[in-house]
Image (cartoon, rainbow, N blue to C red):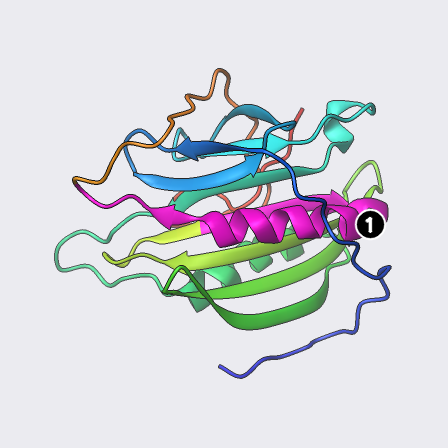
Amino acid sequence: MAVVLAVASQLPAHTAAPAAPTKSYCHPVLQFCFKYPAAWSLLGSVFDGHGAAVAPPQKQEEAAWDVVTVAMVVPPPDEGADAVSIDEAIAQAVSGVRKSGQAFQTLQRQQRTVNGRPAQMVKFRYPEEGSGREWIEELVFIAGPHSEIYSLALKSSVASTARMEPYFQRIVASWHLQEAGSPTEELAAPAKPAQPPAAKPKTTAPTTPHKS
């Protein structure tokens, strides 16, 4: 699929994220890993334990926090079952937001490659139902070697997206699957569950969490 810029975003120009020490997270069962800034906190598990959420220190109430989640959102298909494509996973995620009655606006969508794996990115903007808070969500879906799909998602306020995106891109660039027999990386076990997100692929867990 060719790169499609659905709507030109009027967001501020991106600022470079300063180099900083990082922490490593590897899922103890699903074996995907990523790095995030050492000053950030691991908020807890998401998607019924299939992923984790991380976020920088923030002063506002948790419901208004910028957050990044990384998870397996579509498991490998059962024997004889059809695999879910990235296009289908994105369509289901977008449909979940549209059905909630929110004024959904697509900002960008493009094909990518993440650590040698085929991937797609979609970015959209919407007001949160009830509070009216404006959010930008940037989702990167990655196809795994066994037809599973992973999601890395940034959910941020419109005002902080330019600041958060460089950190998010570094997290995406660090994502990889741990090979069998490779040295074990630092494992970070989430201490508490996070509330599940709104957009939900029907096959398994949703793509981005809403925190309470």
Q: Can residue 205 be seen in this view?
A: no
At 78% from the left and 58% from the top, the residue drawn is 14
Left or right: 176, with 24 as reference point: left
Q: Is mark 1 on a helix, strand or loop?
A: helix
Tell me where the magenta segment starts and ends, as one range. 151-180
Is residue 152 found inside the magenta-colored segment of the image? yes
Q: Can residue 115 be seen in this view?
A: yes
At 62% from the left and 79% from the top, the residue drawn is 4
Q: Which amino acid does label 1 sit on?
A: Val
Picture quadrant of residue 49:
top left
At 47% from the left and 48% from the top, the residue drawn is 174
Looking at the rendered structure, the number of numbered marks drawn on it comes to: 1
Instruction: Check the image and name the residue furthest to the bottom.
Output: 2
Q: In this view, does 204 lie above or below 103?
A: above
* Image coordinates for residue 200, horizontal then vertical, percent: 51, 47
Q: In this view, does 113 lie above or below 37?
A: below
**Is 54 or 102 nearer to us in this picture?**
54
Q: Name the residue under label 1.
A: 158
Please state, as top left, top right, bottom left or bottom right, where the C terminus lies in the image: top right
At 57% from the left and 72% from the top, the residue drawn is 110
Instruction: Check the image and name the residue furthest to the top.
Output: 191
Instruction: Check the image and name the residue furthest to the left.
Output: 79
Q: Is residue 38 above or below residue 69?
A: above
Is residue 204 found inside the magenta-colored segment of the image? no
* Image coordinates for residue 81, horizontal then vertical, percent: 19, 59
Picture quadrant of residue 15:
bottom right
Q: How crowded is mark 1: few (under 14 residues within 10 Å), some or many (20 or more)?
A: some
Left or right: 113, with 179 as reference point: right
* Image coordinates for residue 188, horizontal then vertical, percent: 43, 24
